[in-house]
Image (spheres, rainbow, N blue to C red):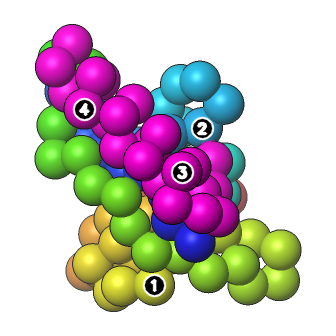
Amino acid sequence: MKILTANRLSDGIAVWYAAGGWAETVGHADVAHDKAAEDRLEAIGAAAAANNEVLDVNVIDVTIVDGLVEPVRLREKIRAAGPTIHPDLGKQAERAA
């Protein structure tokens, strides 16, 4: 399974493609379950990058854990959660509040 991720050009925030737009949380991402869906996500990412909406566009591996989308690679887990040195900042702080 794969999802599309990038950084929003206006503020650098990590975003994930979801329901026709870009979500700030990985849990809302559209999941590609086959090669055709993955190709569709790649085309969406290329178009968004060409339109200067996002940069650093990547299709990444994910798993579903307890019904939630979770990135496989550590780098992507960190991008989804926020800074590792200050758990009081970033997306992980928002979830704790």
- Real-space CA distance between mark 4 and mark 1, rounded to the nearest whole angstrom: 22 Å
Q: Which image quarter is the C terminus in?
A: bottom right
Disc number lying in front (2 or 4): 4
Residue under circle 3?
36
Residue under circle 4?
46
Mark 4 and mark 3 in contact (Cβ < 8 Å)? no
Q: Which residues are magenta?
A: 29-51
Question: Is 76 above or below relative to 40?
Answer: below
Residue at position x 39%, y 31% in the image: 44
Residue at position x 60%, y 38% in the image: 18
Disc number lying in front (3 or 4): 3
Secondary element under disc 3, as helix, strand or loop, is helix
User: Which residue extends farthest front?
Assistant: 36
Disc 1 residue type (three-letter): Val
Residue 86 in the image: state x and y as whole percent: 31, 74
Residue under circle 1?
72
Residue 57's disc number: none
- Real-space CA distance between mark 2 and mark 4, rounded to the nearest whole angstrom: 15 Å
